[in-house]
Image: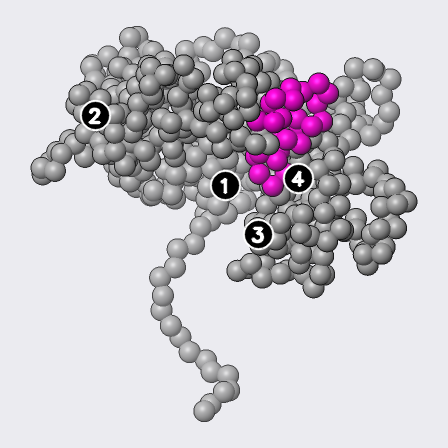
Amino acid sequence: MNLGMQLGTTQRLEQTLTPQLRQFVAILQKTSLELDTAIKDELETNPLLELDDSEPMEDREVREDELPDSGAELKEDHPDDYDDYDSSDYSSLEDSAMVDRGLLDGDADNIDYERYLNDGSMNEDAPFKDLNAPSNDPDDEWDRPIKDSDKGLQEKLRDQLLLWSGTRELLEQLSQAGCSEKRFRSLVEYLIDSLDDDGFLSNDNLGLNGSPVSNDAFVEEIESMLRGDVALDDCSLPVREAVHVLQGFNPKGIGARDQKECFLLQAYAIPGFSPLAIKILETCYEDLLMLRYAKIGKTLGVSTEEVQQAVASFAKLNPHPGFLLSNRLVQGKIPDLKIVNHHGRQDVEAYRSPMQKRLKVNKTYESILKDKNASKHDREYVREHLKKANDFIKALDDRCSTMELVMRAIFKRQKDFFTKGPAFLKPMVQRDIADDIKRDVSTVNRSINGKYVDTPYGIFELKSFFTSGVKQGETLGAEELSSATILDAIKKLVDEEDKKKPLSDQAIADKLKEQGILVARRTVAKYRENNLRILPASQRKRAV
């Protein structure tokens, strides 16, 4: 057997992306907030980029000669908005970047840099502000970040653990059980790391197939407890106390193993909380979930009215205590596109943030390119960063044009949605749009994820326009109904039902059939639970 080095040739097909195309793809998939962050980062790293502060774009009146000459404007001789839309002009993902071939493939020395720099401004007398220098302006204090704003749930709980100090009696009992204070704190930290986003103890971080991930006997005991193999009361003293210490941290409810324990931890900690409500949680929790108020009253020997009053006090409890400490950002629905009316016809426009509108190339460095005495290193530095600045601005423009292209194709297929309402949404998949605009499905996917459009019926994520269909009948060519339409019909029936006699899944299916919507009971149950998050009829029933 020859194990020596050998030299050979082979043929294979391989697709490579240019750096400019990679940048375009990365920019395209960013959300509005992520895009502004990317612009800020680019401004900090590239000295040839700056924001034009001479005139705020949002306050300036746009002249007609500044309007873009593109296919976005509707012609008067086209009565149908996009019936004459021709997607053959776009052939591939690489073409969608619309990059300047002179910059990518041509000789860098032949580039007319003056053309790219003639829109800049120069203010050599403006001094730079030292951001690290102390400020005498009290208003500047408001701009300083909060010290622990970047800390997550686990970090904030570890800070509380640092402040915890056990009693002498507890530390002696732990020592007798073979657990030092340092080891005990490590057990509490292990429990902290086992919390999910809601603040509940979870076994998701355990080893594969339930095997222990540590050789520590107490850690193995904690893992068995989290898996449900061992009850907490049957665990050793260090494990029981570690759980109790964690559950004593703020906010109350942290470290619970289920929703019932979470509510009880909070109820015990609230002064004057209804004793009857606590008793209901302790002894009648299953009946509470099923809203069996009469049965709860009979079990506890109280009236149904007293049970209802006690249940009302549960409004003080938080089912997700972990969110109170989480630093997870909640992104608002910032529209990237909007549907506008142009002379009575609807059109698509892309929003550009104020920062993107004001972004431009700095003219200050033009003198370096024109200065014959400038060193070769300086000239190369300016050329390199000028190319990066140009490519970045072009990638931003291509992002807007690609998203407009995708949205126009969506508008054409979903015209009834925009003219009649959300109930008329038709089944559609990403492949349909990709075929219409002659692009790859991945480009469509990047253009719709996390992107929103402002419509006459509200703000919608572009991804919500892509829904599966339910076939209305078994015959060939039977019409497909959008799942969004079915969801809307189910929600409307549940909202209008008699709360004393809520509709079962079969009753909902029967009523949908009366409306001409053929859906099986199993489909109704799946949509109700997974999509609408609506409880079953037995749990929606209100007490008489």
Whether pointer 1 and pointer 4 mark residues with C-beta atoms closer than 8 Å, the reply is no
Residue underneath mark 1 = 26
Q: What element carries label 2?
A: helix
Query: How much space separates mark 1 and mark 2, taking CA atoms?
Result: 48 Å
Mark 2 crowd level (few <14, some 14–19, many ≥20, 10 Å Cα):
some
Whether pointer 2 and pointer 4 mark residues with C-beta atoms closer than 8 Å, the reply is no
Name the residue located 54 percent from the left edge and 44 percent from the top edge: 109
Mark 4 crowd level (few <14, some 14–19, many ≥20, 10 Å Cα):
many
Mark 1 crowd level (few <14, some 14–19, many ≥20, 10 Å Cα):
some
Between disc 1 and disc 3, the foreground one is: 3
| Quadrant housing residue 331 | top right
Query: How much space separates mark 2 and mark 3, taking CA atoms?
Result: 42 Å
Residue 487, percent across and down? 31, 26
Residue underneath mark 3 = 227
Say if 376 sits above or below 468 in the image: below
Which range is magenta? Answer: 255-280
First of labels 2, 3 by sequence position: 3
Name the residue located 74 percent from the left edge and 46 percent from the top edge: 242
First of labels 4, 3 by sequence position: 3
Between disc 1 and disc 4, the foreground one is: 4
Residue underneath mark 2 = 510
Name the residue located 82 percent from the left edge and 30 percent from the top edge: 132
